[in-house]
Image: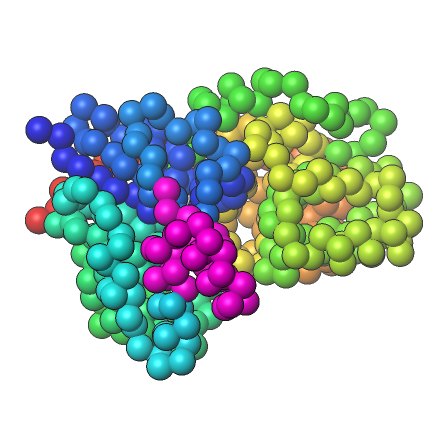
């Protein structure tokens, strides 16, 4: 008889966590496991990539946030009793500082008892698996490259984690950070990186892009990430300004969305870079862009691993990478990429090095199988199976 697994995540919109989740779901052995996927905020761009073997469940919590009375009115109008319960839980927790989520369990109806329930994001996904799901084992994933919870939030989270068998960190560096920050559960923390399916990435990279952006007439730079402060995408604008001032013909493409978009657009206009920096928004298949870029520039200050850097290595695109916890585990400076300071000057220096030194640029286009093999579906799924079946 197949063992039943439950994965819980917010949505399937374009993002690193969602990319990682989809890769896991694609590589599960469905002759051994029956899999449910519970989504809490809608579907998204990656829905069509979900295997047909998966049963998708949906509890809409997307409107459980915001102004209390407006939320309550909308939920009553649609007779969404679970949504009402969650909204009241959030209110009680904010007032009384205690966890009352178990009160919503009678309205949270899942017919099965699971062999293992997996919260693929920390936060509400972790809470739901901890307090509302009936499962023999419970696992949650940590995808963040920093730990910025307050002492009160940390204590609450530790109480929740005591209900889990394993906390999976996506790199050894993140595992070490969590052991230092979260006392008393170090024996539960294991590191399992994200899957990098090199064969699939190279196949998708052969698709034609909506914008044929590579050209011999200019240097094509590419950066992918959420337009948010911790991702440092605004530093690309300042680095580009300096390159243009020195006379380099640059077109820099930014893929991603986020709260800093307006500020980035403001500085692009202020510096007169409208023809040099193009914001492409979220793109579900960025691989043709990565493949055709002259240099992939990763400006993020905070990374737990960074899937996109590994994807660039899979496509033999030279990378300039801001130093952070995750990438420093697999980028060997001047061998398979450049590690630079996480500021505009660091990005500028890395790009200039690759412009001036064509031998270095060519060397960084070489095969990276020695790194990528560590992230293959076979290697990563074996680690996941060991956690699922551990006694």
For this rendering, which residue is in front, 63 or 349?
63
Q: Is residue 121 left or right of residue 114?
A: right
For this rendering, which residue is in front, 275 or 132?
132
- In reply to whether residue 2 is colored magenta, the answer given is no
The residue at 74%/42% (across/down) is 279
The residue at 48%/33% (across/down) is 46
Give the magenta-colored segment's residue range. Answer: 58-87
- In reply to whether residue 63 is colored magenta, the answer given is yes
Give the number of callouts.
Answer: 0
Q: Is residue 10 above or below residue 132?
A: above
Q: Is residue 250 left or right of residue 321?
A: right
| Rendered location of residue 359, percent (x, y) | 68, 33
| Rendered location of residue 124, percent (x, y) | 37, 59
Q: Is residue 162 above or below residue 370?
A: below
Where, by quadrant of the figure, is residue 31 drawn? top left
The residue at 63%/52% (across/down) is 258
Q: Is residue 152 above or below residue 191?
A: below
Q: Residue furthest front?
A: 77
Q: Is residue 163 visible?
A: yes
Image quarter in which the N terminus is found: top left
Q: Is residue 229 above or below residue 381?
A: below
| Rendered location of residue 194, percent (x, y) | 39, 41
Q: Is residue 373 visible?
A: no
The residue at 21%/31% (across/down) is 34
Q: How is the image coloured?
A: rainbow
For this rendering, which residue is in front, 345 or 97?
97
Q: Is residue 197 left or right of residue 106?
A: right
| Rendered location of residue 305, percent (x, y) | 45, 49
């Amino acid at each position: 008889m197949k063992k039943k697994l439950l994965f819980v995540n917010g949505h399937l919109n374009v993002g690193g966590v969602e990319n990682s989740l989809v890769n896991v779901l694609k590589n599960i052995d469905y002759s051994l496991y029956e899999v449910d996927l519970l989504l809490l905020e809608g579907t998204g761009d990656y829905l069509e990539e979900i295997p047909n073997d998966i049963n998708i469940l949906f509890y809409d919590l997307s409107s459980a946030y915001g102004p209390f009375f407006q939320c309550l009115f909308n939920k009553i109008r649609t007779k969404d009793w679970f949504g009402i319960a969650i909204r009241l839980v959030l209110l009680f927790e904010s007032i009384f500082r205690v966890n009352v989520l178990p009160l919503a369990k009678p309205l949270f109806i899942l017919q099965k008892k699971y062999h293992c329930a997996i919260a693929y994001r920390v936060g509400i996904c972790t809470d739901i698996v901890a307090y509302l799901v009936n499962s023999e084992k419970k696992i949650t994933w940590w995808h963040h490259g920093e730990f910025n919870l307050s002492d009160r939030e940390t204590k609450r989270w530790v109480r929740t984690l005591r209900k889990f068998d394993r906390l999976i960190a996506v790199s050894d560096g993140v595992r070490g950070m969590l052991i230092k920050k979260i006392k008393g559960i170090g024996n539960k923390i294991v590191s399992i990186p994200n899957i990098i399916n090199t064969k699939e990435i190279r196949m998708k990279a052969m698709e034609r892009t909506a914008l044929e952006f590579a050209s011999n007439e200019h240097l094509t730079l590419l950066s992918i990430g959420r337009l948010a402060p911790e991702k440092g995408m605004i530093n690309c604008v300042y680095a580009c300004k300096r390159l243009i001032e020195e006379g380099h013909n640059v077109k820099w493409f930014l893929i991603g969305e986020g709260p800093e978009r307006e500020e980035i657009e403001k500085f692009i206009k202020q510096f007169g870079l409208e023809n040099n920096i193009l914001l492409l928004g979220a793109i579900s298949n960025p691989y043709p862009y990565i493949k055709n870029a002259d240099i992939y520039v990763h400006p993020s200050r905070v990374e737990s691993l960074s899937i996109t850097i590994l994807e660039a290595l899979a496509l033999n695109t030279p990378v300039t990478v801001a130093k952070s916890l995750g990438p420093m585990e697999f980028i060997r400076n001047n061998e398979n990429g450049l590690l630079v300071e996480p500021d505009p000057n660091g990005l500028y220096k890395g790009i200039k090095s690759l412009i001036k030194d064509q031998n270095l640029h060519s060397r960084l286009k070489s095969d990276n199988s020695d790194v990528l093999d560590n992230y293959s579906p076979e290697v990563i799924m074996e680690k996941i199976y060991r956690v699922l079946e551990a006694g």
